[in-house]
Amino acid sequence: MFNCFHLRIEMKKLLVLCFLLLLFPTIQAQTGLSKEAEISILTSTPSDEAVFTVYGHTAIRINDPVAGFDWVYNYGIFDFSAPNFIYRFTKGETDYILGVYPFKGYTAEYELRGSSVIEQVLNLTQEEKQRIWKALTENARPENRVYRYNFFFDNCSTRPVAIVEAYVDGEVEYTHSTTPKTFREMINYCTRNQPWQTFGCDLALGSPTDRIATPHEEMFLPEYLMEAFEYAEILSPDGSKRPLVSRTTVLTGDIPEQEVEIPFFTPLLCGWLLFLLILGVTWIEWKKKRYFRWLDFGIFIIAGLAGSVLFFLAFVSVHPCTWPNWSLIWLHPLHLLGGMLFVVKKWRKAAYYYHFINFAALSLMLLGWYFIPQHMNAAFIPLVGILWLRSGTGVCRYKLRAE
């Protein structure tokens, strides 16, 4: 989902640039590439600069020195200024664009970002080069360049894979084996230096994210694509084999990995601090025999709003892997109703029933935490504990007053 996720540029400039740059490739495609031309996969290593850079990026380079032609085809362009972008992104209806621009400008941007750009020159015949070149040129036309983005199954990394596999003579065989990993394990490794981003992904993505990805599905992340291509072979119709990659080069220099400062206030620490704060306020309530209605109202309204987002992702959006989501047990839109019940005294009995059901559900969830068929971020525990604590005290308060 999130996001190789994206290459952020101003859309107005992009549209003008693509229009101008596509004029020459279209003309050149009619005459064909020279025998000196090379087609390669460019992999940009992850960077902690922004949310979308932690996953890396993939693009296709076509370099024809005879024609003085050196362009990058990038499936990772999106228009952040498009109408209702946030809503459409949340719903999973984000449209991405195939952009075309000079190779030097592409590498310069990633070099400034602190990412290495690794080039894998593909071991292709002249006919294969021409077919891929023609397909890319056709894809880049204004009427064809927009596609519906899907983080796991149709993104800037999977598109180049599909192009290569479709236009080589024969079949691409991937011989490199990796340790089986789930989708969540792979994206959480990418966000390992960004605990808040990991927290958000764990909250939004449901149990399908914990499925083991096939070796081919792993290539939705650029670094896995690069590794798979490095060991892949093309099985020709006559039974002969040849390596898919003829050579690999680090283009922007071997940039040393920079030390990343992980924030002190992680979701786990903040969660436990908040739990201790609510526990302290609850203790004051009991000691003074008072009820802070505003506290339950605030907690459950916030939980209800967050639950509404999860509900939208699970039942309305078309994002993959958001349903089923077991986090909806503790974070759901019904908390909005609960929050309203707690502030109206004449609804006291209804509030008791709500607290009772919520307390029972969260008790079962906490007891069976390690049996839930979905990875649950450790930072969820204190947050679940807050709702459990407030509902538990709500049940006890009602029972004591009824006696």
Image: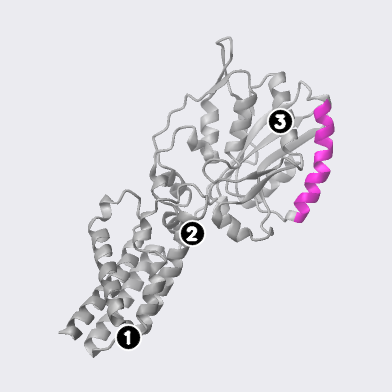
158 or 361, nearer to the observer? 361
> Which segment did they paint magenta?
12-30
Using the rendered image of the protein, determine whether residue 380 is visible from the camera's viewpoint: yes
User: What's the residue at 73%, 54% (across, down)?
Assistant: 11
**Above or below 223: residue 126:** above
Contact check, label 2 and label 3, Cβ < 8 Å: no
| Numbered badge on residue 312 | 2
- SS category of the residue bearing label 3: helix
Describe the colour scheme in one phrase: one colour
Give x and y (percent) for residue 75: 65, 42
Nearest to the eye among marks 1 and 3: give it: 1
Give x and y (percent) for residue 146: 69, 44
Query: Residue 17 colored magenta?
Result: yes
270 or 303, nearer to the observer? 303
Cα distance between the residues tagged 1 and 3 = 69 Å
Q: Which residue is mark 1?
A: 346
Image quadrant assignment for residue 157 = top right
Give x and y (percent) for residue 8: 66, 53
| Numbered badge on residue 135 | 3
Cα distance between the residues tagged 2 and 3 = 37 Å
- SS category of the residue bearing label 2: helix
50 or 94, nearer to the observer? 94
Q: Which of the image's four quarters has the C terminus?
A: bottom left
Three-letter code for the amino acid on which mark 1 is drawn:
Lys
Nearest to the eye among marks 2 and 1: give it: 1
Cα distance between the residues tagged 2 and 1 = 32 Å
Three-letter code for the amino acid on which mark 3 is drawn:
Ala
